Amino acid sequence: NDMVFYNALKNKQLVWKDGIIPYVMDAAFLPHEVKIIEKAFASYRKSTCIRFQPRTAEQDYLNIVKGYGCYSQVGRTGGKQEISLGRGCLFHEIIVHELMHSVGFWHEHSRADRDDHIHIRWENILPGMKAQFDKISAALQDTQGEKYDYRSIMHYDSTAFSRNGKNTIETVVEGFTDIIGSSVDLSELDIVKVCFKVI
């Protein structure tokens, strides 16, 4: 069987070869923190074709650091690629989210078609944080024909970056505003979008 990788990036040069993602881990992580990170790796191993493996001599790899904040680049950018899991980031759902960026996915609420599914309440967003809610051009992002996923691990919650405690995101479909951003692991659609086998 040929393995075909589903990836939100249209630029396939940014896709990890054969779904193998080499990594090195900062020695600053404590043993129990390493276990939390390894549990996130296991979520991908259990449900997808992605494999996070300790680096040997690969040129392109993740450098997982205990930095400031939680962040990752999107897809394989080349060379040593930093992913930060700092203070407050060492929770399973946050690590899975950041790893999903490194696999090649933007935020679900950044989809070009997001206005059909959510309303952004710009007036409630903290100054300087509005870029977190920008849409990604359809020319760059491939939704693979999958429906919008309110349960995606890549979706912000309804009050993300709120300046006043009010909603910054509300769903078009009633009853889902309190569901977005509450997932603790990959959703069913996240798994489908990461990769699949062509029989």
Image (cartoon, helix red, strand yellow):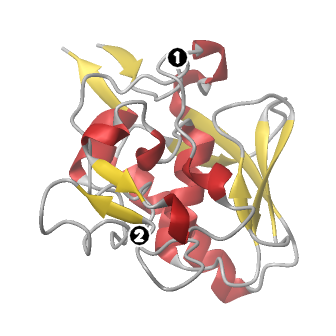
Label 2 secondary element: loop
Residue 10: assigned label: 1
191 relative position to 168: left or right: left
User: Label 1 sits on what residue type?
Assistant: Lys
Q: Nearer the viewer, residue 183 or 39?
A: 183
Separation of disc 2 and disc 1 at Cα? 26 Å
Judging by the rendered image, the residue that carries numbered circle 2 is 157
Q: Is residue 122 above or below residue 31?
A: above
Tell me, yes or no, whether the two marked residues, 2 and 1, touch with CB atoms within 8 Å.
no
What residue sits 57% from the left and 14% below the top?
A: 12
Residue 143 position, x and y percent, is 36, 27
Label 1 secondary element: loop
What residue sits 79% from the left and 79% below the top?
A: 29
What residue sits 40% from the left and 60% below the top?
A: 43
Q: Is residue 191 above or below residue 15?
A: below
Q: Quadrant of residue 164?
A: bottom right
Q: Nearer the viewer, mark 2 or mark 1?
A: 2
Q: Residues within 10 Å of mark 1 (few under 14, many from 20)?
A: some
Q: Nearer the viewer, residue 147 or 169?
A: 169
